[in-house]
Amino acid sequence: MVYGDMHKDKKLLDVLCLEDIGLKSDDVPKTVVCSPYGFDREFGKGVLQRTLKKNKFQIKKVINYFSQSGAKGTSFLAKRNRQNILFLISGVGAVHASHICILLGKCKPVKNVIFVGSAAVLSDEISQDDINIPFESVRADRVAEEAIPLSFKALADKRLAKEFEPFILPELAKINSKLHHGKNYTICVAYYETKKFLERLKKQNIYTIELEASIFYTFLRKAKKRCIAIIRAGDKPLAGSYWGEKRRKKAKVKRAILNSIVNYLVSKTQ
């Protein structure tokens, strides 16, 4: 069994999709929303599902590798007006993300992928209560380059970003937060981040640094799928803040992201 030849072997592709996604390749829907840690951790236990149900989505649990690996919550299908949306736990870091993105790239029905993540903030232009939807992520993940040359840029689909803006901007305005499109940097291991290294990236006008976005942008752009990464500011390491600290607006920012995603999907399932 040669995994890299899945594009030549439909049976193999379906086996791999069932393992990591929970659906056969032809059953993966047009739009997929991904979270590395799981939607319960990102939005609160069951909050996303309850919000979708209030908007007349039907929820069906999907069993895959991440459903059984201790991730917070589970992957699931949300159905409205006969149209399915897949909410998929994609795993933390570039290796897990690459498995998912390679498979999504091979699934013919998939057209749009929205990645929801978090990052450390480097730029003074962005606050910890803002959102970054980067148009480009620097490819320092050390994973995608094995398959795709570094000359191929990790870019968002700007058309999808523009489609999403009318839904995220009003939600951010309610809480006096802003939307940015600053350059992101995807690093392979967070523990490589020294103060000297982060200061150098800041001088290069890097807004945020995290672990997965360039994988999504690289593999899905190569597969001609549309993708954006909605990155919530986590900590500001150069300002002395740390990842798990409590902030007054943190829950409101998460809710703004949730509402914008749900409202966008409602508009697409009329």
Image (cartoon, helix red, strand yellow):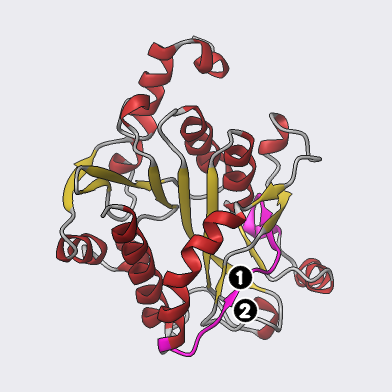
Please tell me whether mark 1 sits on a helix, a strand or a loop.
strand
Left or right of residue 267: residue 53: left
Residue bounds of the magenta highlight: 174-192
Q: Which residue is mark 2?
A: 236
- Badge 2 crowding class, 10 Å Cα cut-off, few under 14, some 14 to 19, many 20 or more, is many
- Which residue is under mark 1? 120
Number of numbered labels in the structure image: 2
As shown in the figure, which amino acid type bears the numbered disc 1? Ala
Question: Residue 187 magenta-drawn?
Answer: yes
Residue 90 % position (x, y): 43, 45
Residue at coordinates 32% horizontally, 66% vertically from top-left? 263
Hey, which quadrant is residue 39 in on the image?
A: bottom left
x and y, in percent, of residue 137 in the image: 68, 56
What's under tag 2, amino acid-wise? Lys
Mark 2 element type: loop
Residue 204 vertical position relative to residue 222 in the rendered view, above or below: below
Is 7 drawn above or below residue 106 in the view shown? above
